[in-house]
Amino acid sequence: MKILVIGKNGQLGRSIQKLISNFNHHKFTLTGREELDLSSSESISKYFDTYSHFDVIINCAAYTAVDRAEDEIDLANRINHLAVKKLAEFANLQNTKLIHISTDYVFDGKNESLYLESDNPNPINVYGKTKLLGEKTVLETMPNNALIIRTSWVYSEFGNNFVKTMLKLGYEKNEINVVSDQIGSPTYAIDLARAILHIISNDNFSKKSFPTEIFHFSNMGETSWSDFAKEIFKLSNLNCKVTPINTDQYPTTAVRPKNTTLSKEKITKQFRFQIPLWKQSLKECLNEIM
Ligand SMILES: NC(=O)c1ccc[n+]([C@@H]2O[C@H](COP(=O)([O-])OP(=O)(O)OC[C@H]3O[C@@H](n4cnc5c(N)ncnc54)[C@H](OP(=O)(O)O)[C@@H]3O)[C@@H](O)[C@H]2O)c1
């Protein structure tokens, strides 16, 4: 298959890049902002007028600066919503399948149990609202042949993320305060990349037409940011004390949902794979970083 990966320089894009040597029966084209700028409708049209006939598009690119999005509403909307509409239109036109990545932040975090794909989204910040519009536009524009995969708390050996920030702070400080009343599941981007490559290699995905659906993916288990930080320090032998604090003691520009733990039952059953526990994947990532 000819596969286009959009967002090659992000955590997920780089994770896919790291794994594709094992999939050399497919031809991958990787693009970054320089080749395909999602904030510009002209750039998207020009790209697909020049390069076409992909079998699959994997959209890993997004406006992901959750706090900055509160002030850059238009830009976040262009990248997370309007660009996704264009991608879905081109995918339809060219008979291409689409894998689009979304977020747990489409939920308000008020659920007491795991979020199912069928639960009602109700985003409470601009980033979540623009990502939800992106999901809706895929469902409307492409009723068939797209998968929307919602993920959460993504980290990896690439780019900036919570794990790398904690490692830096753990080396510099003896004690830090970390929020303990936001609960979710961390996602090692390599595990998500593995899942995506597994899904597209499945005959049911590559050879058949299927109705567009939403799936959830993160590592198994749940934690708070403060327990996540404690585990990072424990596995890295860093002697930095974590003091749990409440969200209202750590004000941020964008409001965050309290509990966004996602149920992964649908994706694991439908595509027949297992997802590692978050602590196991954290260990793998820390080994890569070290
Ligand atoms: N990170 C998380 O915790 C998290 C949580 C839930 C869901 N997600 C979703 O998971 C997906 C992957 O996230 P990630 O962590 O890999 O994100 P990331 O590391 O922030 O990467 C996002 C990528 O999007 C690219 N991008 C931004 N604006 C662009 C534009 N105008 N044109 C083209 N490319 C543009 C960036 O390019 P540059 O490198 O040039 O800036 C970057 O490479 C996204 O859909 C995100 O919404 C992430």
Image (cartoon, rainbow, N blue to C red):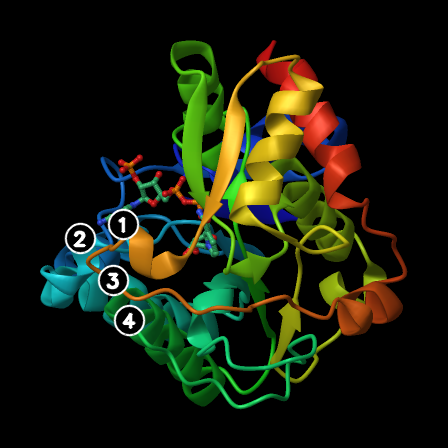
Q: Are marks 2 and 1 in contact (CB under 8 Å)?
A: yes
Q: Are marks 4 and 3 in contact (CB under 8 Å)?
A: yes
Residue type highlighted by circle 3: Ala
Q: CA distance from mark 4 to mark 2?
A: 11 Å
Query: Looking at this view, is 50 or 189 the one in front?
Result: 189
Q: Position of residue 127 (x, y in %)?
A: 29, 65
Q: Earlier in the sequence, mark 2 or mark 3?
A: 2
Q: Quadrant of the C terminus?
A: top right
Q: Position of residue 31 (x, y in %)?
A: 37, 38
Residue type highlighted by circle 1: Ala
Residue 19 relative to residue 225: left or right: right
Which residue, given by chain and number where applicable, does mark 4 sit on?
125
- Element marked by disc 1: loop
Q: Earlier in the sequence, mark 3 or mark 1?
A: 1
Which residue, given by chain and number where applicable, does mark 3 sit on?
254
- Element marked by disc 3: loop
